[in-house]
Amino acid sequence: MIRIAVLQANSSHPEAFINIINGSGSPFRDRARVVTIWDEDFALSTAQASHGVRACERLEEAIDAVDLVMICGRWGDQHPDLAIQMAGLGLPVFIDKPLAASFSRACDVVEAFEAAGAPVLCASAYRFAPEVLTFCEGLDRLGRFRSGQAAGLSEWPDLGPKGRELHFYGVHTAEMIQTVFGEGIRSVVVHPGDAADIAILEFADGRRVDWHLLRDCAEIYEIGYYGQEGHDRVRIDPFSAYYENMMEAVVHMAETGESPVSLRASAEIVALLDAVTLARRTPGERLVLEMRLVPAGKV
């Protein structure tokens, strides 16, 4: 039985994850259980402690005798320091999206986990949406890649200035792009608009994907793939089992020590978000992604 500690409780995700893992009829009932929850604000952890989860006032108490840590803070700048601290314990760690609020801090986390050798997974749940996974399985029938498109809500202004930052909500579409088209984005050009910006992403092998960064609209997340033999599109169903699939990936990582997504891939997501944010300030100019990660095996 994998014993789990949930750390940071200032979003809706801890409640959702606890319900999936500990709730009645959970598919994880014989494999994993959330046992503790902690936040610097004890009232937040108390409010989300359900299904037998114990709210802890001290971090040390929360992580005592657990097998897996889940870092669930709402904002990316909350994650690095706590993640680096957990890497030093050698425990499997899940880090909710995004890995960090800047590429430099993402690199700090990558270096810590590669030095520790601990398994770690950072992801948006949309990476694991059933419709996205099925879509990826059918790409071969479309033939050689010709072009791609992606669209998604890029901000959540109801949460204030930080909710407007691309790293907070743009990360969902960025992770879908990486899941479908792979790693290796090297440059971006942004053309801003009143209702949406369009970012043209260019991969190291010359492929291009247009990313529509939507504002002030319904939650739309979709991907289009244009191949030599045909084309197809996929849109996220807001009620699909993406959280359940992500929890399966997290628990499986704790059981096997293998993560389905490399932390370097997650760092590339942050580099992309940094680049698009900067490119918005210089419309039409090509900006190369900062990707100066320490070479693997050199940490």
Image (spheres, grey):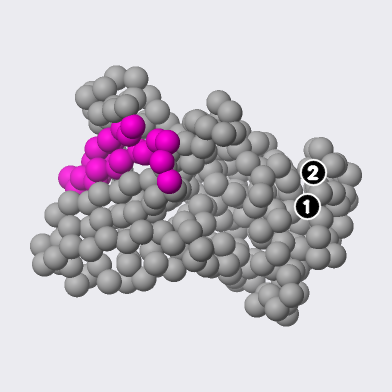
Label 2: element kind: helix
82 on left or right of 112: right
The image's mark for residue 48 is 1
Residue 209's spot in the image, x, y percent? 24, 46
Residue 2's spot in the image, x, y percent? 73, 69
Kindly report the secondary structure that dominates the magenta region of the rendered protein.
Answer: strand
Q: Nearer the viewer, residue 141 or 84?
A: 141
The magenta segment is: 195-218
For image coordinates 26% across by 40% down, the residue present is 201
In which quarter of the view is residue 11 placed?
A: top right
240 on left or right of 37: left
Is 173 placed above or below 255 here?
A: above
Residue 40's spot in the image, x, y percent? 80, 38
| Quadrant (top left/top right/bottom left/bottom right) for the N terminus | bottom right
Q: Nearer the viewer, residue 184 or 276?
A: 276
For image coordinates 65% across by 36% down, the residue present is 78
Q: Nearer the viewer, residue 39 or 95?
A: 39
Is 291 placed above or below 161 here?
A: below
Callout 1–callout 2 Cβ contact below 8 Å: yes
The image's mark for residue 4 is none
Residue 112 part of the magenta segment = no
Residue 184's spot in the image, x, y percent? 31, 47
For image coordinates 65% across by 52% down, the residue present is 13
Which amino acid, by three-letter code, is at mark 2? Leu
Task: Give the labeled residue for mark 2.
Answer: 44
Q: Residues within 10 Å of mark 2 (few under 14, many from 20)?
A: some
In which quarter of the view is residue 30 placed?
A: bottom right
For image coordinates 66% across by 49% down, the residue present is 12
Is 251 placed above or below 196 here?
A: below
Label 1: element kind: loop
Q: Residues within 10 Å of mark 1 (few under 14, many from 20)?
A: many
